[in-house]
Image: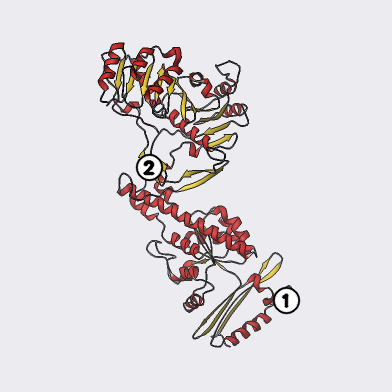
Amino acid sequence: MNLSQTQARSTAVQRSGRSRVAVQLTVSIAPVRPVLAAVQAFSAASTLSSGSQSFSSFSPSITSLRCALSQRGARMVMEASKRALISVSDKTNLELLVKGLESQGWEIISTGGTATTIQQMGVPCAKVEDVTGFPEMLDGRVKTLHPAVHGGILAVRDKEEHMTAIAAHKISPIDLVVVNLYPFRKTVTASPAPEFEVGVENIDIGGPAMIRAAAKNMAHVTVAVDPNDYSHLLTQLASTDANALAAFRRTMAWKAFQHCSTYDSQVAEWLWSKTGSGPAPQMTVPLHLAATLRYGENPHQAAAFYTDDSLREAGAGGVATSIVHWGKEMSYNNYLDADAAYQCCSDYTQATCVVVKHTNPCGIASRDDLLEAYRMAVRADPISAFGGIVAFNRPVDAELAREIREFRSPTDNETRMFYEIVIAPSYTPEGLEVLKGKSKNLRILEAKARAPSGLSLRQVAGGWLWQDADSLSPESITFTTVSAVQPTAAQLLDLQFAWRAVKHVKSNAITVAKEGRLLGMGSGQPNRVNSVRIALEKAGDEIKGAVLASDAFFPFSWNDSVELACKAGVAAIVHPGGSLRDQDAIDCCNKYGVALITTGVRHFKH
């Protein structure tokens, strides 16, 4: 056997106080038996510097043996280290990874800036063009799209024809692929928005191709897309438990395909925003598991909370991206109620407090003094407020925090009010510490303000409903007086306040308000007149001179909703109008000297 038939390389590297031998032997001769003899001869001649143990005695833990037989003969490759291909935009934990791989004897191949970074870390790294024999081209668009890369990833190791094919083309297997993609979401959601061409250039092509190839060949190749997985990855690669490694590869393959799916959905969303309008013919919503919850609406229901990674949600704020400063873990119902409270509160421009129970606002008040707004909001319905969610649209300071902590229920002036959640855009350091003293269980949330905006999706059995969020505000509509009596300036402000509130109450929805605070509301009744009765009852003696808002028109007026409100002492009523019996409502209000205003729009909420 001469050098044209055999090439052997032996490298000794010091690891943990003892030498390891890295060997690559290639034999290309026709008979199989001489091949085996050559391997045995080389193995006998290769010994550790620390002793006389032969190479073959520890080769299972250091080397991998790949054999491929062809019509021309046999090709046997013994490699002391497997090969990893690394190409990452996010270089978090990269040093941990590459130094860990080096210590395990892996050969590392990389691309462009990643290769440079790895070399600067003092870890040997071959560039991908050295493997492909082809330089990067087209401004980096073509780097890894080459058979030397994808053949090495996709070859099924226990298929003779696969190994024969890659051997014939001098392609070596690639056993680990670590890739994360161009920062497309970060690029296209930046402010100011990038030019269209910049967005296009940040669409990764080679990365997803390598990820998908490695994930498909999960039986033989490990893939990693998340820097947070590197530590666990190194542990699994060092393990001798083949079953555990196989299970790990399947999990990582799932994660890889999901990673690509999320990426592709964001690219598709961005392109549709540039080329289409309205609902897209196809749509994928990328979700990220934020928390596994104790249970759902009821203890027998499993539940989890996901954040929405859609481009439209970037920087939008709201409960989903809130910081939990204190308290018990959030529950399924907590998220629903906190979202309802904070969207309602954020919808008001003046300093406002909103109290919510079971997604309906039971107390709302706007004041220049936020502390006074809190008191007024609780007093609207202290029974319902107990155990509710309290939301503010201004920072909470120490004085307000002490009031929240010590405030007694107006029902007996003794019972300290209990709340599930307090949520605000921020807290002063002193305010936060004071509020923590109320209860170890009180959840204290901080979130960027989020009034209703963007896209609203809602699930029905087997499908989803798509609509724009109800972002319509009183300032953007026309209040038209249709009665003989005109509302006063103060009443008009209260009508706008009540109209903003009714948008956040479940239909059939009625709100009664006066002087910038909610006095009563009726929600979720199958008929409107019952919602009116409930709202009037809640308002009590304060109904005189108050205003009433209805989320939809009044189908009946006489001896029904409108006349009940007029007789109770309501001074002004606002509703969308549009009923066949609108004239009845006008006539009824004129009889009782009540102002009637129409908006031309409704606020159903189911």
Q: Of circles 2 and 1, which is in front?
A: 2
Q: Residue at x 51, y 55 (%)?
A: 255
Labelled pair 2, 1 in contact (Cβ < 8 Å): no
Q: Position of residue 312 (x, y in %)?
A: 40, 43
Instruction: Name the main secondary structure of what is drawn in magenta.
Output: loop
Res. 376 visible in picture: no
Extreme residue toward the front, this view: 559
Residue closer to the observer: 32 or 335: 335
Q: Position of residue 175 (x, y in %)?
A: 54, 67
Extreme residue toward the right, this view: 51
Q: Is residue 495 magenta?
A: no
Residue 193 left/right relative to 156: left
**Amino acid type of the residue tagged 2 in the rendering:** Leu
- Which residue is label 2 attached to? 465
Decide: few, some or many residues near mark 2? Use Cα within 10 Å; few <14, some 14-19, many ≥20: few
Label 2 SS: strand
For residue 99, which quarter of the picture?
bottom right
Residue 229, above or below 279: below
Quadrant where the C terminus sits is top left
Q: Residue at x 74, y 74 (%)?
A: 51
Q: Position of residue 177 (x, y in %)?
A: 52, 62
For residue 514, which quarter of the picture?
top left
Rounded to the nearest whole Å, what is the CA distance between mark 2 and mark 1? 70 Å
Residue closer to the observer: 163 or 295: 295
Magenta stretch in the rendered image = 598-604
Quadrant where the N terminus sits is bottom right
- Which residue is label 1 attached to? 53
